[in-house]
Image (spheres, rainbow, N blue to C red):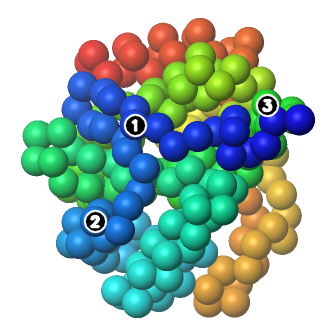
Amino acid sequence: MVSTQEWVQPVVLDGRRIRLEPLHRDHFADLAAVAFDAPLWQWTIMGPQDEAGLRRWFDLALANAEAGTERPFATIDRASGRAVGSSRFLSIVPEHRRLEIGWTWVATAYQRTGVNREAKLLQLTHAFETLGANRVEFKTHARNERSRTALAGIGATFEGVFRNHMIMPDGSIRHSAYFSVIAEEWPDVKARLEAGLTR
């Protein structure tokens, strides 16, 4: 049986505006320069929105990468060469050819610029066309309407809400909305993402 580490290996994904490269310690300073806009983390389980909180998030991402259970990326703005966000492959289940794209965030100044859309295109293309995935899933806080709208906008299918799914840093209970793209839907989703990037 193929292991998680063998199926989803570290990789650089090159786009027109951005590059996704494996998260590395050298990315921390760039991310710390753009990560502390409170709305970025409103719906996540990151914890305190300060350098110590970012460091915990960052170190855990690197530890999971080292263990081979996740593949975190830094989102690099090609024009400046600086990291402006992050995303990752997680919940990787090679025996069922299934994985999740999550922990995605982009600096406020780069939102609504196509950066996130291109990142999704790069990750989904790699998942379906290189890895041969059957399913890619996404989850978000059920109350995060912006994220839910964005996922529906790329053509992901809403599958329902996992109730009482997570405990947030403030102690509140999070319900998680699940979306997915399956292999049969990928050509249409890809066309939609590419069309969105050309507009």
Q: Earlier in the sequence, mark 3 or mark 2?
A: 2
- Residue 17 picture location, percent across and down: 22, 32
* Numbered disc 1: secondary structure: loop
Name which residue type carries label 3. Answer: Arg
- Report x, y in % for residue 78: 18, 39
Q: Helix or strand or loop: what does disc 3 sit on?
A: loop
Name the residue at 58% across, 11% down: 188
Q: Are marks 2 and 1 in contact (CB under 8 Å)?
A: no
- Between label 3 and label 2, give the one nearer the viewer: 2
Any mark on residue 26, and which? 2
**Label 3: which residue?**
97
Q: Amino acid at mark 2?
A: Asp
Q: Cα distance, mark 3 to mark 2?
A: 31 Å
Q: Quadrant of the N terminus?
A: top right
Question: From this viewpoint, is residue 101 visible?
Answer: no
Image quarter hosting the C terminus: top left
User: Which of 90/95 is in front?
Assistant: 95
What residue do we see at 81% from left, 67% from top? 165
**Can you say whether 152 is above or below 37 in the image?**
above
